[in-house]
Amino acid sequence: MILGLPEACWRSIMRMRLALDLAQLWSSLRLSQGSCNVLILAFGVVTTVLCQLVTVVIYPVDLYHVTCPVSVGASSNTQFVHSPVGLFPTVLGPNTPADVVDKVCAKFSFMGKFVARSLMDSRMLDIPFSEAFYKWILGVEGTFTAQDLQHVDPVMARSFAQLAEVAVKKHNLEKDSLLTGKALVLGLENLTMEGGGTIEDLDLDFTLPAYPDIELKHGGKDIPVTIHNLDEYLQLVVDWTLLRGVSAQFSAFKEGFNSIFPISSLQQFYPSEMDQLLCGAIHNRWDTQELVECCRPDHGYTHDSRAIKFLFEVLSYYDDNEQRMFLQFVTGSPRLPVGGFRVLNPPLRIVRRTVEPPQKVDKFLPSVMTCVNYLKLPDYTTVDVMRDRLHFAVHEGQHSFHLS
């Protein structure tokens, strides 16, 4: 284990670094044909390895706030987190051991380098960071409010909103000049939440929701939340969840990112735009006309070829998940860049895979060269055969990389 990661993962990281270093030569060297072949291969390795590293490095459950059940990896000791609102760091409390903090920050530092190099080389990543994560990246974390909790944990945000409604009622009573002394105290103590029950009935204390070992203030485990200290509790929950408890992780992320290029270069973007910048275009139904205009039949095929028409018909009916798997299979990334197929570089090229008689073409599978977005497609006899063969190849060929 190195920095808490399996040795196999670090070998993949080293291969990725080598490939990225080769790729960086593109902008500084005039390459011979042989060198260009090495470079093209490097880009193929980069894309495949990046997608595998996303799973191994980016999704481990110990790094992120968990909002739903985790999934178990190949090893029973490895768990991965999935969040419907995107990933956001898990909170590190003030008593977290220094070695644990160092390991977590090392991973976030690597993640910063990982994201920066991917952006530099126009590599789409399948990393669903939350909008709150992007606000930290863009340096606008000072604008956080309680509303941002919905981008971290929707369940906690709904519970928080109910408590906040009680706090608003409390403020209104305190502003009522007709209520003084015992009348005000009685009014405050009788405040209830929607559905009934007072704040005291919840039996809350000054620990962070979902993190019972993290005290919001000194001795928080022994301090009950009441109507009188509710405002302080709500403010501390927001502060620890969005700022104080994750500042070390984001400092490490930014340090790693800045080692590649200045993270301040991203400040021209809005948080809502960052997902498309980093992860590519949002999935839309593929139109046959768009496929005709953007894809390049070659080496045995034209736009009038039967197989090309079959292919475009099959692709035009793909749902979001099928699109992701096809793109992963052909390009090495599950999403297209912003602009879709029109800006894919190099464009998707479909060539004919020849089959020598007496072999039957319907028995063969399509193959790809992700380095150059190159699909080798047999001339299947029917559209149903093509749909079946393509489905099999796409599902069985996920995350594999073979030299040919």
Image: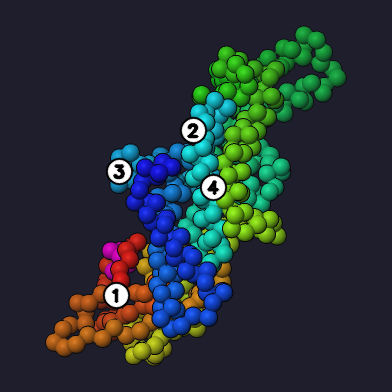
The kind of residue tagged 2 is Asp
Q: Are marks 2 and 1 in contact (CB under 8 Å)?
A: no
Earlier sequence position, callout 4 versus callout 2: 2
Quickly name the residue at label 3: 75
The span from disc 1 to disc 3 (Cα, nearest Å) is 31 Å
Quickly name the residue at label 1: 404
**Helix or strand or loop: what does disc 4 sit on?**
helix
Span of residues in magenta? 393-397
Q: In this orientation, which residue lies closer to the viewer: 304 or 87? A: 87
Quickly name the residue at label 2: 99
Q: Measured along the vertical axis of the image, is residue 245 above or below residue 272?
A: above
Quickly name the residue at label 4: 109
Please tell me how crowded label 3 is: few (under 14), some (14-19), or many (20+) other residues with Cα within 10 Å: few
The kind of residue tagged 4 is Ser
Earlier sequence position, callout 2 versus callout 1: 2
Say which quadrant the N terminus sits in. Answer: top left
Closer to viewer: mark 2 or mark 1: 2
**Residue 45: which quarter of the image?**
bottom left
Question: Percent x, y for residue 219?
Answer: 60, 16
Q: How is the image coloured?
A: rainbow
Closer to viewer: mark 2 or mark 3: 2
Please identify the residue farthest to the left as the structure is shown: 358
**Helix or strand or loop: what does disc 3 sit on?**
loop
Closer to viewer: mark 1 or mark 3: 1
**Helix or strand or loop: what does disc 1 sit on?**
loop
